[in-house]
Image: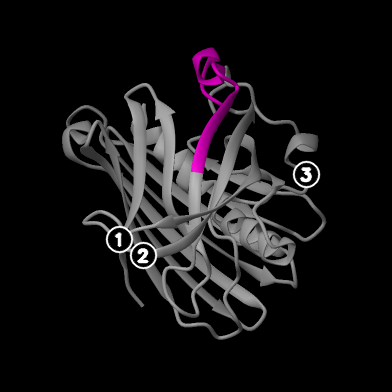
Amino acid sequence: MAGRGVALVMLGLAGVAPGGAGAEPLDVRYEAFAAGFPVARFDFHLKEASGSYVVDGEIRTEGLLRLFYRVKLHAASEGALAAAAVAPRSHEQVMDAAGKAREAHLQYPGDGRVLAQLVPPEDPGRPKPTPQQILDTIDPLSAILAIGRHAAHAGSCGGRFAVFDGRRRYDVVLSDEGSERIEAAPAVAFDGMARRCRVATVKIAGFSNDLDYSPQTTMARAWLAAPRAGAPALPLRVDFDSSWGLVEVRMTAVGK
């Protein structure tokens, strides 16, 4: 479904440059469109202080999609910042889909392991990630900063990032496609040059059924830049295919 695809792309992908110590908090809104109609909204909040970060986001289906697939997902992470990496300490994710709640609470003891508490417990028939598969992974929101800090040091988007949200294990793989100008429009809160990236999401384990693995690798394209002076670079636009056709995600508002 388009709503689930938006959640996977937006929580598994983000900025290409870190903010400085004590940077001002950043609030950003995204809207997703399929066939020109709104299908989802994503609100993102980031606060970086000296050596630490707190980030949270909320996704909900909108418009006609909400009539058939009502989903609200809230996620929050906090951890430590290093020169070119992040070290998550905790992550929480609560999803309400069609009136059924699913929670994941993750803790990172600092030795590469991830301690996951799931409510309700995982379905017995779902192919769970093995302990080895989740070793040295990061949560989806911490991946936002990990991708950003890595790319800031490299000068372009790239790299492979191992992500685990408590139930699903996937890799986000970025490759650089150069720069391109983005012009302001009613649904785009930016005007200027952006870095264009090709994004592959490789599904590894924990997806609900065989259909979720077809295809096993999904592709997207993202345009990244700092939405305002002093802010980290974030996706301005993300395009990917879904069962609804092309889904276009746009940064539509930038606050403090």
**The disc label shown at residue 191, or none:** 2
Inspect the image, locate mark 1, and give the three-letter code of the amino acid beneath it: Ala
**Of callouts 1 and 2, the N-terminal one:** 1
> In the rendered image, is residue 190 in sight?
yes
Circle 3 SS class: loop
**The disc label shown at residue 184, or none:** 1
**Front-most of 50 and 254?**
254
Q: Classify mark 1: residues with Cα within 10 Å, few (<14), some (14-19) or many (20+).
A: few
Inspect the image, locate mark 3, and give the three-letter code of the amino acid beneath it: Leu
Q: Which marked residue is nearer to the observer: mark 1 or mark 3?
A: 1
**The disc label shown at residue 7, or none:** none
Q: Which marked residue is nearer to the observer: mark 3 or mark 2?
A: 2
Do the residues bearing badges 1 and 2 touch, measured as CB atoms within 8 Å? yes
Give, as a single range, the part of the protein colored magenta: 207-221
**The disc label shown at residue 135, or none:** 3
**Of callouts 3 and 2, the N-terminal one:** 3
Q: Classify mark 3: residues with Cα within 10 Å, few (<14), some (14-19) or many (20+).
A: some
- How far is the residue under mark 3 from the one under mark 2? 40 Å
